[in-house]
Amino acid sequence: MKQWKKVVAVLSAVALLVGLTPNQAYAEVNAEAMCQDTVEVIAATVTDETTSANGWAIFTTARAGKLTAEQADAYYANLETLLKTQDSSLLTESNTANIVAILAVTAIGKDATNVGGYNLLEPLADMSYNTGYVTTGATALIAMDSKNYTIPTVGAGGTQTTREALVQYLLDQRNSTGTWGYSYGGTDYASVDTIAMVIQALAPYYNSNADVKSAVDDGLAEMSAQQLADGGYGSACSEAQAIIALTSLGIDPLTDARFVKNGATLLDGLNVNYVQGQGFKGWDGNIDMAFSTSQAAYGLVAYQRFVSQKTSLFNMTDAVPIQPQEPSTAGTEATTGTEVTTGTEATTTEATTEARDKTPKTGDVTPVVWLAGMALISITGMVIVNRKKQ
């Protein structure tokens, strides 16, 4: 009887271990599959329009290697025509329209300082363009550093923009929380989205500027503190921006202990609002293409580039003009062992398959279940042997 009590206690302990494995709920998240699906959703929206929304779609698909040469050329030609028609390098859709266009043009391997003779960086030469809000300054610095562009000379009456001035501006924008955010009702709050976007801009200066390092470390601590038990922040936008920030610093979102809560990671949090084939849900529970899906797409691309050991999302020193895809000898698109150059980096089916096999799945519990099963089998065997002896 005593032996049976011991056996029951051991079996209960093993069952408890299996039942309480924190990663079990997140075992099915496949970052690469989610990335490919979301990029395809974005790719379906690509046009030749010069809007900021389409600029982000061009940027995302180009960095994912999914933009065709025809699509890249159509967008570029339309942008070139617009600049010539208005005879100005200033895009007036929004105060960040030039920044998005710089990122899109750079992503397709073109020179943003010479689009039909117009320099898209000219408006950014005046600090007033970059300081409307802290995230504007952050994205302006990101655009300038995306391919180490030279900042143009500001026109008469303007204040010259420099990288040093932008870095200092970002550092000065921290509020009473000690990091970046917003104020409401006279109270300052720290915002994960804002913190992450500023960190993305400051990442290139992290190892060379002590003030930047200190501010970024404080920002990372706040991002970690706000992370929820499911690994996310309750918003695909926040999770995506955090992933980009971490990978820009060379931090793996899946393994850094600061960003693993109850076995769940930022990718698990991102998965909460993911709907296969459609995109990501927004605050109202409906698919949100403009923000959630758009930002989640290039956030996932940032992670896949990190896993593949490519340059970070906004480091486009590797971007080259997209080449037209060569037709196969059989008259159809070759898919086996054939290099496909529909984006800024060539890929192969074999390489894709290999990468898919190596892609980390957050919270894989297979080893735990296998060990638990083996333990149960062994204990059952011991019980049978003991009963036979008795």
Image (spheres, helix red, strand yellow):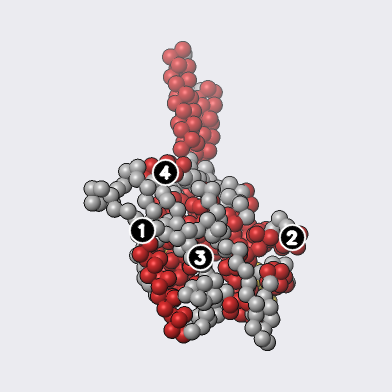
Which percent across, then down, holds residue 168?
72, 70
Q: Nearer the viewer, residue 64 or 228?
A: 64
Mark 3 secondary-structure assignment: helix
Q: Nearer the viewer, residue 252 or 117?
A: 117
Separation of disc 2 and disc 1 at Cα?
42 Å
Q: Nearer the viewer, residue 272 or 39?
A: 39
Q: Amino acid at mark 2?
A: Asn
Residue at which label 1 appears: 324
Which percent across, then down, holds residue 357?
43, 41
Q: Amino acid at mark 4?
A: Ala
Residue at which label 2 appears: 209
Q: Residue at x 64, y 60 (%)?
A: 203
- Tag 1 or tag 3, which sits nearer the N-term? 3
Separation of disc 4 and disc 1 at Cα?
20 Å
Separation of disc 2 and disc 4 at Cα?
38 Å
Residue 231 appears in the figure: no
- Tag 1 or tag 4, which sits nearer the N-term? 1
Mark 1 secondary-structure assignment: loop
Q: Amino acid at mark 3?
A: Thr
Residue at which label 4 appears: 351
Q: Residue at x 49, y 39 (%)?
A: 18
